[in-house]
Image (cartoon, grey):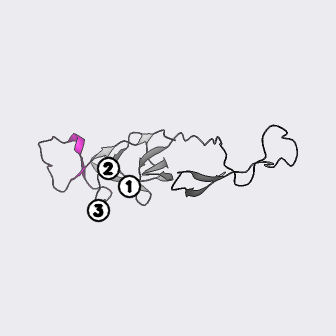
């Protein structure tokens, strides 16, 4: 089976191509079991995908040049990732992001590996940042185990 990569704007249907053995029952072995399958017919099908045991769905906007920004001990790390596919506004990442990684969700104008970061969730609300060279960063853990 393959996806044609086209989604109908009106029906939101995706066009798939599947191989069906003997769709016109030329062998005569399918007597009474199913009707002939004409070319271009619409069918209802059950398609089973593969389960991804070690995958995470993260915001697509975080992936730049196959790297994601990660907060580690007050510093920015740019971790290389393997992206399996993009779904809507998310990326399915199969390698590079581990459980417990804290993804930097704040947009950083010029991210440089090793730059100092300060977590928003660890700042006292009424206390300003102590060092103007430290970039404040919102962090979030990726959703693990998604398919």
Q: Residues within 10 Å of mark 1 (few under 14, many from 20)?
A: few
Q: State the image quarter where residue 49 is shown.
A: top right
Disc 3 marks which residue?
A: 110
Residue linked to disc 2: 105
User: Between marks 3 and 1, how big is the CA–CA gap?
Assistant: 15 Å
Q: Nearer the viewer, residue 76 or 49?
A: 49
Residue 5 visible (yes or no)? yes
N-terminal label among 1 and 2: 1
Q: Position of residue 6 (x, y in %)?
A: 56, 58
Looking at the image, residue 145 lies above or below residue 9: above
Residue placed farthest to the right in the image?
A: 28
- Position of residue 122 relative to residue 129, above or below, is above
Q: Which residues are magenta?
A: 113-137
Dot 1 lies on which element?
A: helix
Q: Is residue 95 visible?
A: no
Percent across and percent down for residue 33 are 80, 37
Residue annotated with mark 1: 61
Per the model, the C-alpha gap separating discs 1 and 2 is 9 Å
Residue 10 position, x and y percent, is 51, 54
């Amino acid at each position: 089976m393959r996806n044609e990569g086209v989604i109908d704007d009106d029906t939101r249907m995706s066009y798939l191509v599947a191989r069906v053995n003997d769709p016109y029952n030329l062998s005569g072995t399918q007597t009474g079991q199913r009707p002939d399958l004409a070319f271009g017919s619409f069918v209802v099908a059950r398609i089973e995908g593969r389960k991804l045991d070690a995958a995470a769905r993260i915001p697509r906007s975080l992936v730049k040049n196959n790297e994601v920004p990660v907060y580690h001990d007050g510093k920015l790390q740019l971790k290389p990732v393997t992206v399996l596919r993009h779904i809507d506004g998310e990326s399915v990442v199969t390698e590079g992001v581990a459980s417990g990684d804290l993804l930097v969700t704040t947009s950083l104008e010029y991210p440089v590996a090793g730059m100092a970061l300060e977590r928003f969730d660890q700042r006292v609300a009424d206390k300003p940042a102590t060092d103007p060279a430290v970039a404040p960063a919102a962090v979030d853990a990726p959703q693990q185990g998604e398919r």
